[in-house]
Image (cartoon, rainbow, N blue to C red):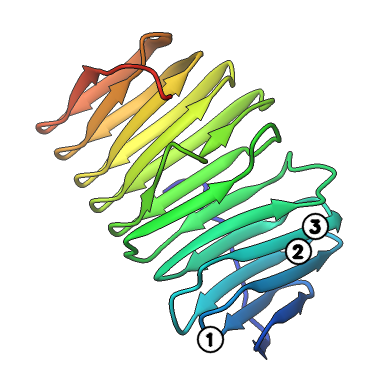
Amino acid sequence: MNFNPSILAVSIALVSASASASSNQVIHLSGDHLNSIVISNEMDVVVKCDAEQPRIEINASDAVMPHMQTQVTQTAIDIVNHKDLNEGFFSFLKSSPEVTIYVRDHSVQHLDVQNGANLTADHCVFNNTEQLSIAGENGAHLEVETNSPLVNLVLNSGGSAQICGETTIHGQLVSGSFLKTGEHVHISAVSTFFGSSLGKTGDCS
């Protein structure tokens, strides 16, 4: 993907219930209970999990949301106490049965989903963002609702997406990718290549 963040992992924090993150850090979560990651200042963070995490809480009360990569099996990510998500970047890199991201009514600019990960529409809502970049590849599936005026979308290698809300989509679908859009979504400039296709669906509910 052309907007992957560059992340240098320089330390690992092993935690049971919570972890504090400093710049350029890997947060390594173990156990199957709630984990709370406290973020201060701007930083790049990679979150790795040993076991299924029922919920990861990102507390970013004093921070601009960092670039964040997750390598998780099954979890919900809840962003809390944040002031500004305008630089938010979420990258889901590993196969997972389901990943739900809770960021209602706050700004996230980049979303990158790969290798079979799923994002569901129930809580994958991106509002108040002037422009949202979404990428999905290698069988990843995204269900997104947004009121962002413009969505830049790239799907590749069997990636699929359902985009609902009120928005305009630019982008391209390559190598067997599939896009479904809600009734209030405008397709402005989306190219399809190598067996990819477009379809319509009802709006997210």
Task: Look at the image and tell me in which quarter the C terminus lies.
Answer: top left
- Name the kind of residue labelled 1 in the image: Gly
> With 26 as the anchor, is 143 left or right in this view?
left
Measure how far apart labels 3 and 2 are at the Cα level: 11 Å
Q: Is residue 171 above or below residue 177?
A: above
Q: Residue furthest right?
A: 62
Q: Is residue 34 above or below residue 166?
A: below
- Name the kind of residue labelled 2 in the image: Met
Q: Earlier in the sequence, mark 3 or mark 2?
A: 2
Residue 60: image tag: 3
Question: Residue 192 occupies which quadrant of the picture?
Answer: top left
Q: What's the residue at 34%, 56% (across, down)? A: 117
> Camera-side residue: 156 or 68?
68
* Secondary structure of residue under mark 3: strand
Q: Are marks 2 and 1 in contact (CB under 8 Å)?
A: no
Disc 1 crowd, CA 10 A, few/some/many (<14, 14-19, 20+) = some
Q: What's the residue at 30%, 50% (across, down)? A: 140
> With 107 as the anchor, is 70 left or right in this view?
left
Q: Position of residue 183 (x, y in %)?
A: 36, 9
Question: Residue 181 occupies which quadrant of the picture?
Answer: top left
* Residue hosting label 2: 43
Q: What's the residue at 60%, 26% (across, down)? A: 131
Measure how far apart labels 2 and 1 are at the Cα level: 25 Å
* Residue hosting label 1: 31
> Camera-side residue: 116 or 73?
73
- Name the kind of residue labelled 3 in the image: Ala
Comparing marks 3 and 2, which lies closer to the viewer? 3
Q: Position of residue 111 (x, y in %)?
A: 51, 44
Disc 2 crowd, CA 10 A, few/some/many (<14, 14-19, 20+) = some
Q: Are marks 3 and 1 in contact (CB under 8 Å)?
A: no
* Secondary structure of residue under mark 2: loop
